[in-house]
Amino acid sequence: MSALLPRLLPIGLAAATVLGAGGGAQADPYIPGRLPAAQVTQVGEICRTTIGVPAGFELYSNCVESLSTSAARLSREVAFQDARRDCLAKGLGASALAQCEVATAASAAPLPKLAANAQPPAKSYFRASTREIRTREQTACAQVGYEPVYSGFAACVANLDAALYAADHPQR
C-alpha cells in the first residue's frame, strides 16, 4: 500500500470549510485518529465535491467523520507496513522485531495530502440516485488512498455508506 502514497494529489482549502460554514453554530465533527487539520480540510473537500454534501448538514459531519476514520486507519496501516519492512531489514528477532515496529511506526509521518475531485458533482447528493451515491462513496474512499483490490477499500465504502444512511435516516 505504501506504493500508493506518491500518487496522492494535493488539494487546498481553508480549515473553516470542514467545520461548517453553514451560518449557525455547529459542533466540530468528532475526528477519530486525530488527523492533522490539513487532512481534515481535505476530507471535508472530498465530502463536499465528491459526495455532494455542503457543509452545515449532518450528512457532511458524518461523511467527514467516516472518511477521517478511514484515512487515519490507512495511515496507521501504511506506517506499520513500512516499519515492518524496515525492521525486518535489520535482521531482528521476534520480540525485538515487534518493539522495533511499534517504535518505528510511532515516529512515521502522516499521509501526505489526499486526492480530491477538482469539480463539484453534476448534482447534489440529495438529487443523486442510489447507484450514483455508491459510485461517489467508492470514489471518495479511493481519494482517501484506498485501492479497490484491498479489503480496506470495501470497509471504507461500507462505513461511509452507513454514516451517510444514519444521517439521512435518523432514529425517531
Image (spheres, rainbow, N blue to C red):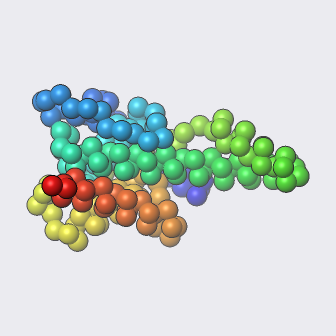
Quick one: which residue is furthest to the front in this view?
172
**Could you say which quadrant of the image residue 129 lies in?**
bottom left
The location of residue 147, given as percent across then percent down, is 48, 63
Residue at position x 46%, y 37% from top?
Answer: 35
Q: Quadrant of the N terminus?
A: bottom right
Residue 34: where, in percent of width, then height? 46, 36
92 to 155, vertically: above or below: above
Q: Quadrant of the image for the C terminus?
A: bottom left
The foreground one among 136 and 19 is: 19
Q: Is residue 103 above or below residue 135?
A: above
Circle count: 0
Q: Where is residue 14, by image quadrant?
A: top left
Q: Is residue 144 left or right of residue 83?
A: left
Q: Is residue 123 above or below residue 69?
A: below
Residue 16 vs residue 170: left or right? right
Q: Is residue 148 visible?
A: yes
Residue at image x 84%, y 46%? 96
Q: Position of residue 24 (x, y in %)?
A: 13, 29
Location of residue 68 (image quadrant):
top left
- The percent position of residue 4, horizontal first and vertical second, equals 54, 55
Q: Is residue 119 visible?
A: no
Which residue is at a point 77% across and 49% down the rendered structure image? 98
From the viewer's perspective, is residue 39 above or below residue 165?
above
Viewed as shown, does residue 108 lie left or right of 22?
Answer: right
